[in-house]
């Protein structure tokens, strides 16, 4: 583990009040931990921008009754076997299904997969949550 380093930050008073309010709402006990999380989030985003190896979850909710939609979702998944680690299918109710797709690979490929899933007719909601494989993030 690297040694802990302290540094100072100068902020406008109003900005600091808003930051303190936001971190209290999220349950942080210190500014330091909130700042660490902000830095980590930025580093993860940079890895995605550089198309480094990343991990993520694609979540989609879709109309179970939409003709040939399940086949289209499955076909897209088969075209991305290298990036897909696992999938989970859940029946939410009579009309809606939830599909969770765990992905790992080049950021660009994963982003394109999520975009293609989102564009399928009958998909009601699709989101991509990204993270990193851990390299360079502490």
Image (spheres, rainbow, N blue to C red):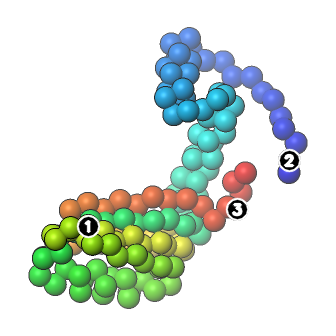
Q: Earlier in the sequence, mark 3 or mark 2?
A: 2
Q: Look at 27% across and 72% down and name the residue there.
A: 91
- Which label is found at residue 92? 1
Q: Secondary structure at mark 2?
A: loop
> Which residue is nearer to you in this view: 4 or 11?
4
In the rendered structure, are the residues bearing label 1 and label 2 in contact, judged by CB atoms less than 8 Å apart?
no
Q: Is residue 121 above or below residue 3?
A: below
Horizontal relation, residue 59 to residue 34: left or right: left
Q: How many marks?
A: 3
Secondary structure of residue under mark 3: loop
Q: CA distance from mark 3 to mark 1?
A: 36 Å
Residue 41 visible in image: yes
In the rendered structure, are the residues bearing label 3 and label 1 in contact, judged by CB atoms less than 8 Å apart? no
Q: Is residue 43 above or below residue 31?
A: below
Q: Nearer the viewer, mark 3 or mark 1?
A: 1
Q: Residue at x 15, y 70 (%)?
A: 95
**Which of the two labelled residues, at mark 3 and mark 1, occupies the earlier sequence position?**
1
Q: Nearer the viewer, mark 1 or mark 2?
A: 1
Picture coordinates of residue 111, whole percent (x, y): 41, 66
Name the residue tied to disc 3: 135
Residue 108 lies, in percent from the top left, at: 46, 68
Q: Toward which corner of the image does residue 4 lie, by quadrant?
A: top right
Q: Which mark is residue 120?
A: none
Left or right of residue 29, residue 50 in this image = left
Q: Earlier in the sequence, mark 1 or mark 2?
A: 2
Disc 2: which residue: 2
Q: CA distance from mark 1 to mark 2?
A: 45 Å
Residues at marks 3 and 2, CA–CA distance in whole angstroms? 15 Å
Q: Dot 2 surroundings within 10 Å: few (below 14), some, or many (20 or more)?
A: few
Going by the image, does 115 lie left or right of 56? left
Q: Is residue 118 visible?
A: no
**Looking at the image, residue 60 lies above or below residue 65:** above
């Amino acid at each position: 583990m690297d040694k802990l380093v302290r540094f100072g930050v100068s902020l406008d008073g109003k900005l600091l009040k808003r930051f303190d309010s936001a971190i209290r709402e999220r349950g942080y006990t210190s500014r330091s931990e909130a700042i660490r999380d902000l830095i980590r989030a930025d580093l993860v985003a940079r890895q995605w921008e550089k198309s480094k190896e990343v991990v993520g979850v694609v979540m989609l909710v879709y109309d179970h009754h939409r003709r040939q939609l399940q086949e289209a979702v499955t076909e897209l998944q088969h075209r991305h076997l290298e990036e897909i680690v696992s999938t989970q299918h859940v029946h939410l109710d009579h009309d809606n299904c939830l599909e969770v797709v765990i992905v790992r690979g080049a950021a660009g490929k994963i982003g394109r997969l999520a975009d293609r899933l989102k564009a399928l007719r009958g998909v009601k909601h699709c989101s991509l949550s990204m993270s990193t494989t851990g390299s360079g993030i502490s």
